[in-house]
């Protein structure tokens, strides 16, 4: 088995967890391990039947694509010369566990099945594996099971077993020698508690990329508040058409995506990415990323060639991508090639924020909440639905005027949208 190349730009893959141990039987098509790229997590299936003879990398290892990561074959098949073929045994396994391969029928009932990562986290957090319920294959304890158990504990005690035994004996002696009357009862002082949350996986990947972008790109954020009365009216007229022809719900977010895609086509200097420290690529096609809060963390699926799509087609694609992101069904292609990103926090009531650029892109648009506000119009105070647009840009690539012109175009399309949205080609 080799580290699969799951995307065109992928160079490395991180082994998150193995589903099989050395010596286990594996069937073709059965998930063997979970791999994380810089885009997505995916299960990797075995493509042959056989025994998992040797795992060359353990969980957490970062491996170049196409490198051999495991050998699968017959139980007595010799391994290549550059590998000893000796089955490694984790140092924290008991003698009964190491002999399980020879006497499986005697050890299955008493052995705690856990991944190496789960054992390492358990030692770090002071968790007894016998207290944890496994959710992996054959009830094997995964790293996530240990973390969930640790978080669910009332406090994060760091006492040793000896300290716990001493405390128990002291408490027993105290109870037998002291009689407490109701008058002696005191209100217990509050006990400080906490939870230790490991920083790894998708959270670490997203965090590292955010830190890189924030440290390398000099961010400047422009804020523009616009009246979207006409856009909301147009949306009201288009909703039945879109739902009838595509089954998708036409949201205000889709209208902003549509306007942004066409504004980017007019401003290729904003629709750009870094190729190297000395070269910037200005893209003629718009590949628009949408930040989606998925159960496993932040994902940014991409609507490819967004500037060529009708409002119907864009609405349908956006809806499908959001569903796949939330169901964990995105493919590497869904996450590749973005030239600009839009992030919407309006559903949480956030009016304005400073979005961080999705490096190597050079700008990002943050969309705030839709709020009715009083404004002055023709000398009179009126209430209008107002939307806040927040454009962060890399000042190395764009001057303030360049970014402001792009934001002005987006604002124009959303305040007077009829001309832009007139074409409804499927």
Image (cartoon, rainbow, N blue to C red):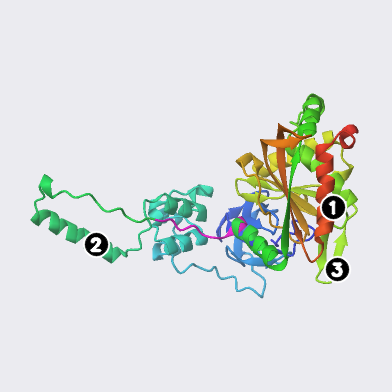
Separation of marks 2 and 1 at Cα, in angstroms? 70 Å
Label 1: element kind:
helix
Q: Is residue 159 left or right of residue 175?
A: right
User: Which mark is nearer the camera, 2 or 1?
Assistant: 1
Labelled disc at residue 405: 1
The residue beneath circle 2 is 165
Residue named by callout 3: 279
Q: Nearer the viewer, residue 361 or 142?
A: 361
Residue 383 picture location, percent across and down: 70, 32
Q: Is 417 located above or below residue 159 in the figure?
A: above
**Residue shown at 78%/54% (left/top)?**
336
Secondary structure of the residue carrying tag 3 is strand
Q: Does 33 lie within the magenta span?
A: no
User: Which residues make up the magenta segment?
Assistant: 194-202
Between disc 1 and disc 3, the foreground one is 1
Q: Whole-Å distance between the Cαs marked 2 and 3?
A: 65 Å
Q: Looking at the image, which is closer to me, 228 or 111?
A: 228
Q: In the rendered image, is residue 74 in sight?
A: no
Q: Quadrant of residue 10?
A: bottom right
């Amino acid at each position: 088995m080799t580290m699969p190349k799951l995307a065109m730009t992928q160079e490395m893959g991180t082994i998150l967890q193995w589903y099989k141990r050395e010596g286990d039987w594996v069937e073709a098509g059965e998930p063997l391990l979970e791999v994380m790229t810089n885009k997505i997590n995916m299960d990797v299936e075995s493509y042959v039947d056989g025994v998992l003879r040797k795992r060359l990398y353990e969980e957490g290892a970062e491996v170049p694509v196409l490198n051999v990561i495991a050998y699968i074959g017959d139980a007595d098949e010799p391994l290549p010369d550059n590998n000893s073929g000796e089955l490694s045994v984790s140092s924290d396994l008991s003698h009964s566990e190491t002999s399980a391969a020879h006497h499986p029928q005697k050890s299955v009932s008493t052995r705690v099945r856990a991944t190496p990562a789960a054992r390492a986290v358990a030692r770090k957090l002071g968790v007894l594996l016998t207290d944890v319920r496994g959710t992996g294959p054959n009830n094997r304890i995964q790293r996530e099971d240990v973390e969930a158990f640790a978080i669910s504990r009332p406090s994060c005690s760091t006492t040793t077993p000896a300290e716990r035994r001493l405390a128990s004996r002291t408490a027993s002696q105290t109870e037998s020698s002291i009689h407490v009357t109701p008058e002696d009862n005191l209100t217990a002082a509050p006990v400080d508690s906490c939870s230790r949350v490991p920083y790894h996986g998708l959270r670490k990947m997203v965090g590292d990329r955010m830190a890189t972008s924030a440290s390398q790109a000099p961010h400047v954020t422009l804020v523009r508040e616009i009246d979207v009365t006409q856009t909301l009216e147009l949306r009201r007229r288009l909703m039945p058409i879109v739902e009838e022809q595509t089954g998708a719900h036409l949201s205000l977010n889709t209208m902003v995506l549509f306007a942004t895609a066409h504004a980017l086509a007019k401003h290729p200097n904003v629709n750009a990415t870094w190729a190297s420290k000395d070269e910037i690529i200005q893209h003629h096609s718009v590949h628009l990323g949408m930040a989606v809060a998925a159960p496993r963390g932040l994902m940014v699926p991409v609507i490819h060639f967004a500037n060529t799509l009708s409002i119907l087609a864009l609405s349908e694609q956006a809806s499908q991508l959001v569903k796949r992101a939330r169901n964990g069904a995105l493919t590497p292609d869904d996450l590749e090639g973005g030239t600009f990103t839009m992030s919407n926090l309006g559903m949480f009531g956030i009016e304005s924020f400073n979005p961080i650029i999705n490096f190597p892109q050079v700008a990002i648009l943050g969309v705030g909440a839709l709020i009715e506000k009083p404004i002055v119009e023709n000398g009179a105070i009126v209430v209008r639905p107002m939307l806040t647009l927040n454009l962060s840009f890399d000042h190395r690539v764009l001057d303030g005027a360049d970014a402001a012109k792009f934001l002005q175009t987006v604002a124009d399309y959303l305040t007077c949208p009829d001309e832009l949205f007139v074409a409804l080609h499927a």
